Amino acid sequence: MNTILVTGASSGIGAAIARLAAQQGYDLAVTARRLERLQSLCQECEPYGVRVLPIQADLAQWEGVQAVAHAALAAFGRVDVLINNAGFGRLNWLETLDGEADIAAQIQVNLIAPIQLTRQILPSMIANRRGHIINIASIASLIATPTYSVYAASKFGLHGFTEALRREVAIYGIRVSGVYPGGVETEFGEKAGIQRKSGIKTPDWMRLTAEQVAKHTLRLIQHPRREIVMPGYLRVIVWLNRFAPTLVDWVIQQWFVARERSLT
């Protein structure tokens, strides 16, 4: 496989995936809304002797999804690996979120856009009897926490989509994988509107780098797996959330919600 389409490639995990993929010899189609960021990324990747196609598009719009799929397929003839990475969060109590800008937009970008783009790319993969779809989700796909209600809803949906699609298309030789990272050092936090009056936040030592996520994501292409949860110790918390939900509810209420709500 030698052609990868990466969404949300202007920064963070998407940009890190593109840089590493170029170093490994993959041709690339990269898309995001910020054209200047994409052009700069292409300049970084081209010295590795690969073809890089920047596609400016807003995946919140149906026309943007169509434009990305059409441009990538027209330029390369096929997409071997689709990496659905684009997404954002607005993290606050549900009653404070704006219905359109915070709620509808998150569902549109984080869930509907990857579904629609996959639908556009999938027929060519089926025709070729090969391909790999990798959805960059979040640990919030598996554990839902306060102030993440809508973000978690979108990521739980992406997890469900990933699982169902894997079972739909395996017969055609197409792989489908989910990547579920914990906190990552990206621009996510700057745009999420996080307001922690108690000062509670993910410790720096627990945060991943975009490059770490990129490395594990690209490793999936050569060594396919259904999913990656990273860091690995988060699997313990996922297990507790599934099999001891009452305990997890109590800890979250006492450690986080009671402290935050008492300060509002």
Image (cartoon, helix red, strand yellow):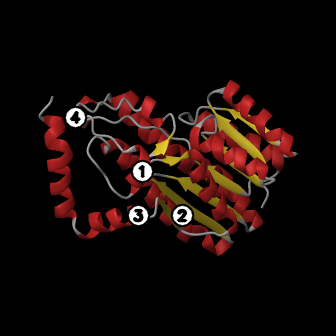
197 to 181, vertically: above or below: above
Q: Position of residue 108 (x, y in %)?
A: 47, 39
Q: CA distance from mark 1 to mark 3?
A: 10 Å
**Of marks 4 and 3, which one's residue comes earlier in the chain?**
4
Amino acid type, label 3:
Tyr
In this rendered view, identify the residue nearer to me: 63 or 153.
153
Q: CA distance from mark 3 to mark 2?
A: 27 Å
Q: Which quadrant of the structure image shows residue 201? A: top left
- Per the image, the residue denoted by label 4 is 198
Asked whether the residues under the numbered discs 1 and 3 touch, taking CB atoms below 8 Å apart as contact, a structural biologist would say no
Q: CA distance from mark 4 to mark 3?
A: 25 Å
Q: Nearer the viewer, mark 2 or mark 4?
A: 4
- Residue 233 numbered mark, or none: 3
Q: Quadrant of the N terminus?
A: bottom right
Q: CA distance from mark 4 to mark 1?
A: 19 Å
- Residue 206 numbered mark, or none: 1
Q: Nearer the viewer, mark 1 or mark 2?
A: 1
Q: Position of residue 87 (x, y in %)?
A: 50, 41
Asked whether the residues under the numbered discs 2 and 4 touch, taking CB atoms below 8 Å apart as contact, a structural biologist would say no
Assign a secondary structure to mark 4. Answer: loop
Q: Residue at x 47, y 47 (%)?
A: 111
**Of marks 4 and 1, which one's residue comes earlier in the chain?**
4
